[in-house]
Amino acid sequence: MFNWIGIFQNITTQVSQDTIEKIEEFGADRYYVHLNVPEKDETVKRKIWIDGASLMNPKLFYDVAISQAKVWLPRMTGKEFEKIMMAKFYSREKSKDYVKEAEDDDQFKRMFLDYLDTKGVYSDKEQLFVHKLPYYNQKKSTIEFDLANFEKELLKSRVNLKRVDLVNKMINVLKAKKNRGKYEEKSCVSWEIQGPKASDKRIIWEGETIVIGDQAGEIEDE
């Protein structure tokens, strides 16, 4: 009897492995799983759209498969499911339509560039000290900005990050450094990014051109 159970388990595992053809990475934590679905006298190729957490969870994966692809996958043990899916995941393909802009880091960089575009970047450090607006240090080829002011702009876009997570993104995504500078002998703490100068009014940062302005835009209430 136990031999039959083992044989049956091996058969169901093989069926599942043959049905799950490959995993294709489409964007940040989003995947297509290509399936070979038996239908009457033929095998039809279908794919399901799934996130990473569901990809690792047998029950969620089975539910998505039956819902999106109309395929009934034989139940595997947790160990067999992990073995098959791990192998498929580490041999995954990147989609030719991969959406790089959907990655969290790229989205955050875009939000920062939008912030600079909205607020402007000024050559007078007084704008940073008084109005908390981005300032261009021509000598160092850096842009200094106020973290609280950037955070306020993120909140307007309904992006709510804990301060510790925001600081982590400053360091690891924007590659920004904290600058304990001064203005007229008074403390003027900011964060700064650096990029090569393209002209007196432009620098290049992360492949993007940032234009330097000459006057303050709308001044926000403190």
Image (tube, rainbow, N blue to C red):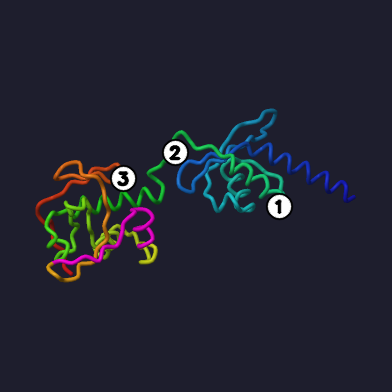
Question: In the rendered structure, which segment of residues is drawn in magenta?
Answer: 167-183
Query: In the image, residue 114 lies at what x, y percent?
Result: 25, 50
The residue lying toward the viewer, choosing from 191 and 4, is 191
Q: Which residue is labeled 3 in the image? A: 206
Q: Which residue is labeled 2 in the image? A: 98
Q: Looking at the image, tell me whether mark 3 or mark 1 is earlier in sequence order.
A: 1
Number of other residues with Cα within 10 Å of mark 1, as a class: few under 14, some 14 to 19, many 20 or more: few
Q: Which residue is labeled 1 in the image? A: 79
CA gap between label 2 and label 3 equals 20 Å
Q: Looking at the image, tell me whether mark 1 or mark 2 is earlier in sequence order.
A: 1
Q: Looking at the image, tell me whether mark 2 or mark 3 is earlier in sequence order.
A: 2
Visible residue check, residue 120: no
Q: Residue at x 67, y 34 (%)?
A: 38
**Screen quadrant of the C terminus:** bottom left
Query: In the image, residue 28 lies at what x, y percent?
Result: 45, 47
Residue farthest to the top? 41
Name which residue type carries label 1. Lys
Name which residue type carries label 3. Glu
Visible residue check, residue 74: yes
